[in-house]
Image (cartoon, rainbow, N blue to C red):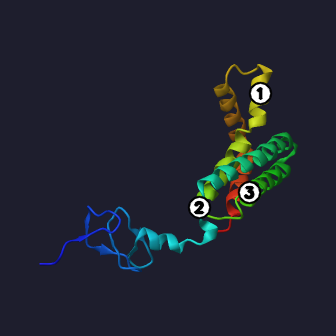
Amino acid sequence: MSKVKYCHFHPETETGLSCVTCGKNICPKCMAEAAVGFKCPECAQALKSHIEQISPKSYIIGGLSGLLIGTGAGYIWHKLSPYGALISLAVAYAAGFLISRAISYSIGNKIGVKIQIVAGIITFISLIYNPIVVFSLLTTGIFPSFSSVLAMMSIWCTSCIIKLLAVVIATWAAVRHFRI
């Protein structure tokens, strides 16, 4: 009869798996899929380069800087989008690019799927629900509540195919410029 093996990281869990790199026993809770077989958390973490390792503090700093630049760029887009489709699309692309550069610069030019998602969300919010435009609509007194302003902005951005395309292009530009 073979000896029972226990996970190196979860000593109470029986396992039959081991890391393909270091040979430590691992369980399904801690294993990471590799090109061939599975790796322990330590060996899997070693696969990420330093450029892909982003701290939670960096996500906050990057998000805030992206939102700051995105608020300004989104406001400019809101003001210039009535002047034609080409201007709307070009300014939207520039907004997405500027947001990605602001985030990238503020986090030390790191890359990764998670930061791409953050950039995409910030770009979407900056264009459709621009904080400056929301605040200015709330202070005019035309709309009775915050939710009515958000509903109006959703309808405004989705009512025209060019505006919708501009938001998609801006989001694509923000995500694309992280070059994973």
Residue 151, position in %: x, y? 65, 31
The amino acid pointed to by label 2 is: Val
Q: Which residue is mark 3?
A: 106
User: Residue at horizontal 85%, vertical 50%?
Assistant: 87
User: Residue at horizontal 77%, vertical 43%?
Assistant: 71
> In the structure shown, which secondary structural element does the residue marked by tag 2 occupy?
helix
**Number of the label disc, if any, that sits on residue 137:** 1
Q: Earlier in the sequence, mark 1 or mark 3?
A: 3
Quadrant placement of the C terminus: bottom right
Q: Which residue is mark 2?
A: 113
**Number of the label disc, if any, that sits on residue 69:** none
Count of all numbered marks drawn on residues in the image: 3
Report the mark closest to the observer, 1 or 2. 2
Report the mark closest to the observer, 1 or 3. 3
The amino acid pointed to by label 1 is: Leu
> In the structure shown, which secondary structural element does the residue marked by tag 1 occupy?
helix
Residue 12, position in %: x, y? 26, 61
Circles 1 and 2, Cβ within 8 Å, touching? The answer is no
Q: CA distance from mark 3 to mark 2?
A: 17 Å
Residue 95, position in %: x, y? 78, 52
Q: CA distance from mark 1 to mark 3?
A: 31 Å
Find residue 18 and report its image quarter: bottom left
- Between 4 and 175, the residue placed more toward the observer is 4
Circles 1 and 3, Cβ within 8 Å, touching? The answer is no
Q: Earlier in the sequence, mark 1 or mark 2?
A: 2
Answer with left or right where residue 19 lies relative to residue 4.
right
Answer with left or right where residue 19 lies relative to residue 128.
left
Answer with left or right where residue 132 lies relative to residue 24.
right
Quadrant placement of the N terminus: bottom left
Report the mark closest to the observer, 3 or 2. 3
